[in-house]
Amino acid sequence: MNYQELKEKTKKWNQFANSDTLGSFDFYTYIVSLDSLTTNDISRFHKSFNQDFNEILNSKANLTPEEYEQLARILPLVIHEYTHFIDSTSTIWGLRHLNLMNEAYLSNNKHGGTEGGFIKAKRFYDHVRKIRLPDYYTTSDLKKKNKRPWGSTLTLGITFASDGSLSNEPVFFSNFSNFDGDLLVRSPISTVSILEASAMSQEIICHADLLHRTTGDFRQVEESNFTEQILSYLYNPKITEYSVCVHVLANRLNCKDILIAFHICSQITRLILNFPISAFDTLAEKCPITSLINCKKGDEYELRLIDGLRNHNLGILYYLICFALPIESYNSSQSVIAGISSAIKNLGLNFADLQNAIKIEADELHNATQSSKIASISSLSKAGYSNLKSISGGQQKLSFGSLNLPPVALSDSTQSEIFTSKTNQLQKFDLDSSFDELYDGAMWVNRFAEACI
């Protein structure tokens, strides 16, 4: 697979273009690419270590400064991009995405589709387009000084429909102001906010684990560098749609430890991405919104939140879960798990019923795609469903070495199998044939969407 050709073909619809500069994941073709790495980088790792990547992830042995620097350049990036893949195949949201994609690509007349079914292509196009909200919904004044710490206030707005009228789709905004109180940026909480919070959480947890295996003065210096690196990410006004979830959570819980905030975020985003449609519908009917956020019954604020739940809006759900969390939820790992359980209960849901609803919807989505006439979608469905069943709901850190993961595309037009588990169903997944197959579907979807006038 030619790297430059891959980037050129997929740049039109890259939802993470502003944040993922060292690697990427493509929602139309499921290609994971590590744009800053080559085969030589992977080969140097294997020459330096007598372990594979999975053993390195699970090891507690101390690292020399040279070992740490080599691993810190590769592993957190790998984890970040593979998290996007897991979230898009091995969660309820991911299986829904895969199912919509399957229906859209099969609607092409090349696969026997007819005009009456072309709407499935437009439905998937609109779904992908809304993963990251258009730039219109982010407003910024970059002339103001970026003085830390920021302040933040939340406001609830509404999106416009394709014909220019007001829709019934609400959107939460975080209005970030600098230390002087000047408004810097208004950022929406969108689906891409949830997905990026999930991937950044796993990346930072991985990086922190590597750092904790260093010693002495080197560790002290690198901990300071690492903290500044995270803060630079969080306080970058150009990418707040990607970082907004951690801000909202930390402010809500008054959590000063950013690493702990990312740990909590990893579990909340996992819950949200596995939230079944039936649970959204239950919340729309029964969620005690007025007591959670202290608003009046029947006022516009409550009605908009209910509309968001009816529309299965991930940003609205994230906001409500943050408000349903007990304030002391970040005191320990046990309190995080207990806090999320309490949040589920505070929302008016039963944990056992929620788990059962997840299983039912996962089974339905898997059954709809596992026998797809598009071979790569069938393989991704089976592998993703298997991953979903193996990932525990309480996991803060995903066990990547035991999951089904495809090879990655590298910037020198080569491919690499990062994790070499014998049980990996996608270890020999053919990226070239899969890309050709899924890119053909993506082009059909975009071509038909342009025809919709």
Image (cartoon, grey):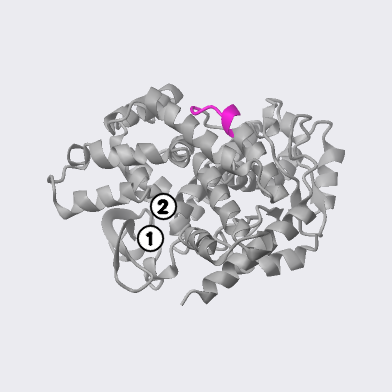
| Quadrant of res 398 | top right
Work out whether 349 lies above or below 225. above
Residue 5 pos. (x, y %): 75, 68
| Quadrant of res 161 | bottom left
Between discs 1 and 2, the one toward the N terminus: 1
Residue 300 pos. (x, y %): 17, 55
- Residue in the image at 73% along x and 64% along y: 6
Work out whether 182 lies above or below 42. below
Residue interval drawn in magenta: 388-394
Element under disc 1: strand
Q: Nearer the viewer, residue 44 or 381?
A: 381
The quadrant of the picture occupied by the N terminus is bottom right
- Residue in the image at 25% along x and 39% along y: 285
Residue hosting label 1: 187
Residues at circles 1 and 2 in contact by the CB criterion of under 8 Å: yes
Which amino acid does the dot numbered 2 rest on?
A: Val
Residue hosting label 2: 244
Q: Is residue 250 left or right of residue 367?
A: left
How many tags in the picture?
A: 2
